[in-house]
Amino acid sequence: MPATVVVGAQWGDEGKGKITDHMAESADLVVRYQGGNNAGHTIVVGDEKFALTLIPSGVLSPSVTPVIGNGCVIDPAVLLAEMGTLRKRGIDPSRVRISNNAHLIMPYHRKLDAVKERFLGRQQIGTTKRGIGPAYTDKYARHGIRVQDLFDEKIFREKLEVALRDTNLMLTKAYNQLPMQMGSIADEYMEMARKIKPHVTDTSLLVWQALRDGENVLFEGAQGTLLDIDHGTYPFVTSSSPTAGGVTSGVGIGPMEIGRVVGVAKAYISRVGSGPFPTELNDEVGEKMVEIGGEFGTVTGRRRRCGWLDIVALRYAVRINGISEIAFTKLDVLSHFETLKLATGYKANGEDYSEFPRQQRVLYECEPVYEEHEGWSEDITRVRSYDDLPAAAKAYCARVEELAGVPIATVSVGPARDATIVK
Ligand code: GDP
Ligand code: IMO
Ligand code: MG
């Protein structure tokens, strides 16, 4: 059975966790392929609300094996705390599998993330300060420390010494900070290693075997297309590849194993942190989206910037990821707007743009070209069949499908698992 990728089609927080959790009911493996605990996925099952950052959303389905692939960066303290919280709430995390090749987030990564942002001042990215960027920087600089290094204390200490030599120079000379101590870090990580060991395996082999056995494998993206290190609004991006292409290297499988790419898009759009945002609304309409949509970050609690659905960006996401269908979320939030707008193009310096501009400056300077659609006032949170949606809601969805060039296969009308319409 070919695997499915669930990917964010916007700047993150599209509702990937909710959609993955819904799809995980019939899955065997749910696999994260990039990112770390910068992700925040809120999932509502019955009366219970879960906020997951690192552990794949599939953990809430008892038959699923949740897998953290090699392309992820793991903060072991966060991993153990998240497992502890799940255990307390009656969810068994013993099934979680972690790649031997994933890189570790170290205390100095968190420190560097925070001080670098402070030094950037007005140019700051607005990171989650979880150490994500510095951990990936060390990976590519080839002095990162991997999960497997935890199980060979001599090698772990050697690698830590090499990493700290560089990092402490940077911390003390460039950023005027105190150096970090090798001994206490090593002791803390050796202690956590014992608890993590039973979960560690060759996850590439595990996924490959599951695919050979005909199991249903879901790859769960964190962040979104426009936060991708290559295809996003660089440098206001994350330091990994959330796009579908990230799956092959982030898990260790071939592209022919993937048969379906579900792009998750909100019925409007949001972003947290800095960076260009053509359809951003700094008015009472945007404020209403924040309020009704509950648009505050799961990880940092920051207010999300909101705006009308950007079709130019959505079509870009369809192309970059090879999206075969859209899961359209938070349609219920639009119930209370008289008129809805879709940005079908941009206008800048007398030029029209229908494709995502190759010069990023255009994203700052452009005016979106909007087409208006009639809203609806009915509460749609209890609708479970597409036909039962108000005519104006169906017309809005149909127009999005037409403009995006791919079908909307799922419509989400509330945070709960069952508030989902499968077309
Ligand atoms: P993710 O990072 O893509 O998994 O998304 P987040 O969980 O960070 O943000 C999405 C938020 O919207 C969460 O609070 C969800 O519970 C909520 N949510 C998801 N789908 C819907 C929906 O269809 N309607 C409403 N009202 N809320 C939703
Ligand atoms: P989920 O999986 C929204 C943003 C940060 C910042 C930039 C870089 O919940 O969709 P980082 O800490 O990754 O170095 O921050 O990326 N960002 C997210 N925004 N949702 C996320 O994850 C995000 N993860 C990172 O706000 O602008
Ligand atoms: Mg989120």
Image (tube, rainbow, N blue to C red):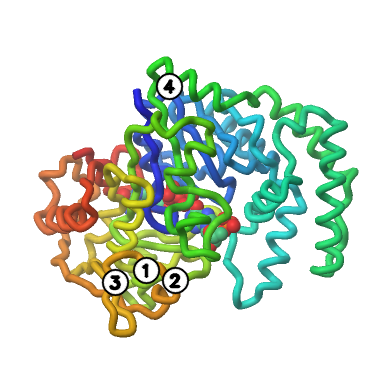
Q: Quadrant of residue 115?
A: bottom right
Residue in view at x 61 percent, y 77 percent? 122
Report the side of 42 relative to 189 (left or right).
left
Residue 211, labelled with which disc?
4
C-alpha separation, residue under disc 4 versus residue under disc 3? 42 Å
C-alpha separation, residue under disc 2 versus residue under disc 1? 6 Å
C-alpha separation, residue under disc 3 versus residue under disc 1? 7 Å
Residue 294, image x, y percentages: 40, 59
C-alpha separation, residue under disc 1 versus residue under disc 4? 38 Å
Which residue is more in the foreground, 358 or 336?
358
Which residue is more in the foreground, 355 or 379?
355
Tell whether label 1 touches label 2 (CB within 8 Å). yes
For mark 1, does the 10 Å Cα neighbourhood hold few (<14), some (14 to 19), or many (20 or more) residues?
some
Residue indicated by mark 3? 353
Dot placed on the residue nearer the N-terminal end, 2 or 3:
3
Which residue is more in the foreground, 314 or 309?
314
Secondary structure, mark 4, is helix
Residue type for callout 2: Gln
Judge whether residue 36 can be spotted in this image: yes
Residue 94, image x, y percentages: 59, 24
Residue 274, image x, y percentages: 52, 69
Tell whether label 1 touches label 3 (CB within 8 Å). yes
Dot placed on the residue nearer the N-terminal end, 4 or 2:
4
Residue type for callout 1: Pro
Residue indicated by mark 1? 357
Q: Is residue 189 above or below residue 342?
A: above
